[in-house]
Every structure is written in structure tokens, then in C-alpha cells.
Amino acid sequence: MQLDSNFRDWYDFAFERSGPVYTRDIGGGMSRPEMFEYMQSLDLDVPAHGTVQELAARYRRDPDSIEAYLLQHNILQLVVYLDERAHCGEGKTLLDIQDALQRYPNHYCSQHIPATPTGLGSTLRYLHVGQRRWWLRYNSLNDWRSNVGDVEIEVMYEEKPGYHPRIKLPMFAIDFVHAGAKLYAIDFNEAPGLDPLNGRIPASEIVAQLKLLANSTRMWY
């Protein structure tokens, strides 16, 4: 299998110069609106999302809600997407809702769900490569985004091998924020970096796993 990619990863040397082409595009996946709609179609909980104006109007229609109180007192925060296809912590900013209304009223956004009392980022990642799948934890020691700044990454455990029942992509990752009793899906990435697996799995095994579903890329949505 050959590799066509716009970024480098540690296992790239295991690809060959002939055979089918595996395309790995860090910005070629779904836009943020498509992503949230897709994750909802998988029956995952997601944060409230829409344009900044849409979310503010939605909260105002229910004056007795917690969100309306937070809106009134400018406590509620939004993740505003400046680039709807960016990943790796890029292309987004965290703003109080009133600031977001003034600066980016028509930009797409999602309600910020704090993962820690300190406001520092912490997420769980469900990483799928072929039939192999892991759960990882990302913690930032100095940023609200879990994968930006001084980051600690823990490979928690590997699940029993198997295909996802509804997602037939060679590789993907879903990021979750754990709040209360719920996991909120906040990102779907078709080209996740695999640096946390370096030293845990041979490069040749990653390529072999990608071959299993390489011809099914993007066919399920």
C-alpha cells in the first residue's frame, strides 16, 4: 500500500511504493457542522452547537434554563471555530458568549463543557486503526485544549479487536469530554496522529490494519 499524506507520522516508512493508495488528509474530513450531525447520528451525546447567534437565541427562548442564566451573567463560554476543518487544537478559540456575539456572531460554535475544575483541558480519545482500538487520555497542564501546551498522554487500555458496527473507516478517532455522568463527543478525526502508539505496535502492523478497510474510506456517510 502507498501513502498519500499532507503530514508525517512515525510509521510512514512501512508503506510501500506500489499497490493501492491510502490517503491521509489532516484537513480533508467533515466540517464542524457535518461532524456534529454525524456524531449525533451515531447516538453520541454532543454539546449544544450552531452559529453563535443561533445558540444565544436558543438560550433566550427558555428563560428558566441554566443556560439562560449563564447567558445573562456572561458566564457561559463557547468554542468558536475559526476554521471548521482544523484539528490538533487549531482553528478555534474559547470566548465568553457576549464576546463571541460581538466578534463572531455568524461563526459556528459549540458550548464549552469544562472537563476539570481548573479549566485545563482533559479528553478521552477512542482510537480505531483497522480492527484494533484503544482508549487514551489527553491532559494539558497549561491550556484549555487537552492537546495543546504541556500535554500528558496516557494509553489507558486496548479493547478486544473488532470493527466498529457503524463506522467502516480504516482509521479514525473520536474525542470525548467527561462531564458528570456523560461523555460528550466533541471531535471526529479521520487522520489522527498515532504518536502515542509509537513503541507499542510495529509500524508494519499499522499499515496491515489500514489495508483491511482501505477501500471503504468515506463510504459510510
Image (cartoon, grey):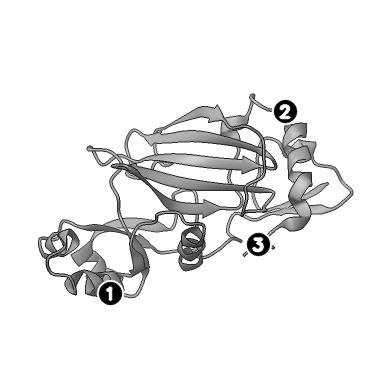
- Side of 123 relative to 210 (left or right): left
Residue at 69% across, 63% down: 219
CA gap, disc 1 and disc 2: 48 Å
Q: Which mark is residue 220?
A: 3
Residue 212 location in percent, x, y? 77, 45
- Which kind of residue does numbered mark 1 sit on? Gln
Question: Disc 2 or 3, which lies upstream in sequence?
Answer: 2
Q: Report x, y in % for residue 160.
A: 63, 32
Q: Quadrant of the C terminus?
A: bottom right
State the separation of the CA atoms marked 2 and 3.
Answer: 28 Å
**Above or below: residue 30 compared with residue 156:** below
**The disc labelled 3 sits on which kind of residue?**
Trp
Q: From mark 1 to mark 3, how far is it between C-alphas?
A: 31 Å
- Residue at position x 52%, y 35% from top? 135
Q: Which residue lies under the disc numbered 1?
A: 53
Q: Residues within 10 Å of mark 1 (few under 14, many from 20)?
A: some
Residue 202 is tagged as 2
Tell me the crowding category of disc 3: few under 14, some 14 to 19, or many 20 or more residues within 10 angstroms, Cα based: few
Q: Are marks 1 and 2 in contact (CB under 8 Å)?
A: no
The earlier-in-sequence mark between 1 and 2 is 1
Q: Is disc 1 in contact with disc 3, using a CB cutoff of under 8 Å? A: no
Labels 1 and 3: the sequence-earlier one: 1
